[in-house]
Amino acid sequence: MTPLDQPHDPPAHTVLSVLRGAEQWLQRRGVDAPRRSAELLLGKVLGLDRLRLYLAHDRPLDGAERSAMRALVARRGAGEPVAHLLGSWSFRGLELAVSPAVLVPRPETEELVTLALERAGPGARVLDLGTGSGAIAIALAVERPDLQVTAVEVSRDALEIAAQNAARHGVAARITFLRGSWWEPVPPAARFDLAVSNPPYIDPAAPHGLAADVAAHEPPLALFTAAGDVLSCCRAIVAGLGAHLVPGGWFVAETGVGASAPALRLLQQEPALEAAELRADLGGIDRFLLARRRAAGA
């Protein structure tokens, strides 16, 4: 039984009563942010944004709308990410298609884009390694039309979504998509002023802090490193920076709990890099890796 079936609900089944019932039902099932989930799902059913939803609290739902909401709430209660139920997610104000083939873009990665933009000079050549939904590459191309962006992704399904998102936001012609693992599809002679990445950094043998719905529904390829080695992906990326970053070029990447300190040491030990540092996100968690390519001959 879902909240929409409960006998104590008002007969009219208004927006307000359905929201309250869905929130309570999701809360009892331990769903994160149950109120927001309920609002987003009902907004999808009714075609209303959050403000218009609140202005329509007394609006009754018909049978078809209640049925659609019931199905979505049941799926959310079973742990399916709300972004997958919506089919899209907002990233730096851009609505991006998402599916189980890609990670749902996180607010922390929006901060990564800011750090990248601060280090991208006019007309910079930028490489996004492991683009997934295309969130980073597309945000860079939209916010800085002067940038020359290349995006690499090993998953064919993810690359198709990234291309669709680029077309949706009018930047498909300004992003070169390459399919392959890390540096593999990048031409040997290619040089970049900035390399950015949000690679996997979670050890599948010790996924501490990973939410259950993320582990169950988001792509393992984009979440997990090699077992017992949180640096497996970061190491593969760092190995190519000396050959593909121009002198003075920047590397900016996202990392997380358990991987941040060893990743920083990896950057500090790489002869081609200097000025390696680790910065915290807005929540105070060590999150962002930065390093600069040494000048030629240094």
Image: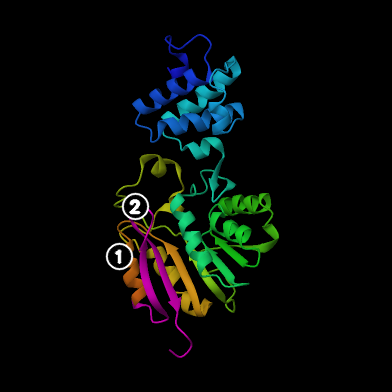
Marks 2, 1: nearer the viewer: 1
Picture residue at 31% right of the left edge, 71% below the top: 265
| Quadrant containing the N terminus in the rendered view | top left
Residue, disc 2: 204
- Estimate the x, y position of residue 45 in percent, counting from the top left: 58, 27
* Separation of residues labelled 2 and 1 (CA atoms): 18 Å
In the image, what residue type sits under mark 2? Pro
Residue, disc 1: 261
Which structural element holds mark 1?
helix
Q: Which span of residues is magenta-colored?
A: 269-298
Picture residue at 35% right of the left edge, 57% below the top: 256
Which structural element holds mark 2?
loop
Mark 2 neighbour class, 10 Å CA radius: few under 14, some 14 to 19, many 20 or more: some
- Estimate the x, y position of residue 241 in percent, counting from the top left: 47, 75
Q: In this image, 171 relative to 225: left or right?
A: right
Which residue is the extreme one toward the bottom? 297
Q: Is residue 182 visible?
A: no
Give the vertical position of 132 relative to 292 (above or below). Answer: above
